[in-house]
Amino acid sequence: MHEPETAYQQFVDVQSGAIRAGGRLSVQGADLMYGAVLVLQGRGHRRMTLDLEGVQVVDDAGLHALRSLQDTISATGRELVLLHPPAGVGAR
């Protein structure tokens, strides 16, 4: 039987610089993720971890936004480490 998709949710650990995401990752979810990354940067983190193990579905817009986020972070000299990335997103 098919499990229903859940809305995007994230848990941010400002001490360790980690974000754990779950549910459906759309462009709106990626926007929330970007906001969390900005908060972590503001707290002085240069290396952040994004665990996507709980993400059930990533739509095309969410995938594009995630790639853009990864590129944006890299361009600032910071690092965004992806754990359990969806297909189409890898280490850059």
Image (spheres, rainbow, N blue to C red):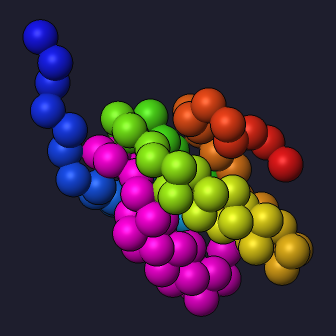
Q: Which residues are magenta?
A: 21-47
Residue 70 picture location, percent across and down = 72, 61
**Residue 14 shown left or right of residue 66 in the figure:** left
Residue 47 picture location, percent across and down = 72, 63
**Residue 70 shown left or right of residue 20 in the figure:** right
User: Camera-side residue: 1 or 44?
Assistant: 1
Residue 51 picture location, percent across and down = 51, 44
**Residue 77 shown left or right of residue 41 in the figure:** right
Answer whether residue 90 is visible to the viewer in this image: yes
User: Camera-side residue: 9 or 4?
Assistant: 4
User: Camera-side residue: 9 or 28?
Assistant: 28
The residue shown at (34%, 59%) is 11
Question: Where on the picture, by quarter, is residue 54?
Answer: top left
The residue shown at (21%, 53%) is 7
Position above or below: 74 against 59: below
**Residue ranking furthest to the bottom:** 42
Residue 63 picture location, percent across and down = 57, 51
Question: Where on the picture, by quarter, is residue 6?
Answer: top left
**Residue ranking furthest to the top:** 1
Answer whether residue 14 is visible to the viewer in this image: no
Q: Is residue 28 magenta?
A: yes
The residue shown at (67%, 37%) is 88
Q: Quarter of the image containing the N terminus?
A: top left
Q: Is residue 33 magenta?
A: yes
The residue shown at (38%, 38%) is 57
